[in-house]
Amino acid sequence: MSEIRNLKPELLWRNFDDLTQIPRPTGHMEKVQAFLLDFAKKVGVEAFVDPAGNVVMRKPATPGYENRKGVILQAHMDMVPQKSPDSNHNFETDPIETHITDGWVYANNTTLGADNGAGVAAIMGVMEDKTLKHGPIEGLITRDEETGMFGANDLPEGELQGDILLNLDSETWGKFVIGSAGGVDITSTLAYKEVENDQETAVKVTLKGFRGGHSGLEIHEGRANANKEMVRFVRNAMAELGARLAVWQGGNMRNAIPFKAEVVLALAKDKVAALKEMVEKQRQLIESEFKTIESNVEFFVEDAEKPAALVPAEIQDNIINAIYAVHNGVLRMIPAYPDVVETSSNLAIVNIDANNTHFKILVRSAREDMREYLATQIKSCFDLAGMKTELSARYNGWDPNPNSEILNLLEKVYKEQTGEDVIVQADHAGLECSIILGKYPHLDVVSLGPTIRSPHTSTERFKIDTAQPFWDLLVKTLEEIPAK
């Protein structure tokens, strides 16, 4: 039996442990949808899968609480499938293995799925617990949030019945989120016809060991982007050593800072020694530039099988220049709140191989005009390289409402339970709240949750001692929801 089943609160941790046994990487929701429907049947609450693929649960009010405002508890069922380079984990078939270290729950060399399994487990606990007092409750567990918020985007209008939405996808206990960034996906592609390889030999160059992380919540920390650091070396190798590009693979999730990039380069045999020296110099430079942020940088050269074909020289130069030039990281902070990021971008994915180039960038901004400005700037950069660029999956930010009734109640209960004032702020992450509000503008919305660190990475972890106070706050707030 997993050791986390013995943690408190029992309902939350037992349900979270059960979730870890269900493969649920983004894009593969069938098993977790079936699991949630089966759970609802066992605990005796209504549940169905809506046309968008979301699981909706409904629990009637406790007798005497029928006149209270309805509450929608919302979380997403999918998880980011990231693992360490030496892991053989198959996210589509294997359960997540967990362990406890220094007061945190971790997975074994993979993402844990506390983003947003912690929220799903809390919803399951509320649905299961027969001792709670509350008005009518809905659980909205959305599909495929991590790759485009598809469940929220496709949520049918008129489906939800509640008046209040508590999003359980916030990741810092002691902080309530009342606003979030909007975003837009940028996909740039270029088809080309490979040319015959006229070089003498080939090498594979690997850059890895960066922290990676969430491209919204952690973009302000200045963590290294493996694609942006690799291009500095590749451009120099081409200019000084005549190296030619065959393959580039960097990053695999649109909303994660890439922690690894690999390239295959072809070049003359007598240039290999100089290339290895260049790699070592670049490694030292990276360590110097990121010495307080990145401590596990690995940058090395291996022999590679000589590829039959290469990227054409002109195409190669154009796309390398585009990678080098394109904006990455924070563009600016919110002027009125200088500690909060306003606008940013992350060069998440670079794939160059087999006659095709594919780039993926996620732009985030609290302002629609700045979102479009940076997205257009990035598109212009790729246009100059002759690439085809599409902007998709736009979603607006969530405007804060500091006079929210549910916020005032949550602040009161938090102060009563902890003796402290809670932090209230907007986040640079994208939350489904903004999309749901677009369809249900009457909702009063706050996001909260226990503490989770390094989501979207193999070091994701869930702080154990924040689970109980989070649960206590949630159930007490449900009990005190006002009448309609």
Image: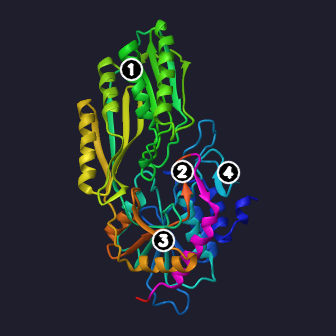
Q: Earlier in the sequence, mark 4 or mark 3?
A: 4
Q: Describe the element under mark 4 as helix, strand or loop.
A: loop
Residue type pointed to by label 3: Val
Outermost residue, top direction? 270
* Residue in the picture at 29% in, 43% down: 390
* Residue in the picture at 50% in, 16% down: 277
Confirm or deny contact between disc 1 and disc 4 (CB under 8 A). no
Coordinates of residue 345 in the picture (x, y in percent): 35, 45
Say the numbered circle drawn on residue 422. Answer: 3
Q: Earlier in the sequence, mark 2 or mark 4?
A: 4
Magenta region: 458-482
Observer-nearest of 83 and 207: 207
Spatial separation of the CA atoms under disc 4 and disc 3? 33 Å
- The residue identified by callout 4 is 97
Nearer the camera: disc 4 or disc 3: 3
- Quarter the C terminus occupies: bottom left
Judged by its main secondary structure, the magenta piece is helix
Q: Describe the element under mark 1 as helix, strand or loop.
A: helix
Say the numbered circle drawn on residue 352. Answer: none
Q: Earlier in the sequence, mark 2 or mark 3?
A: 3
Residue type pointed to by label 4: Glu
Say the numbered circle drawn on residue 236. Answer: 1
Observer-nearest of 278 and 204: 278
* Residue 157, magenta (yes or no): no
Coordinates of residue 435 in the picture (x, y in percent): 35, 63
Observer-nearest of 247 and 159: 247
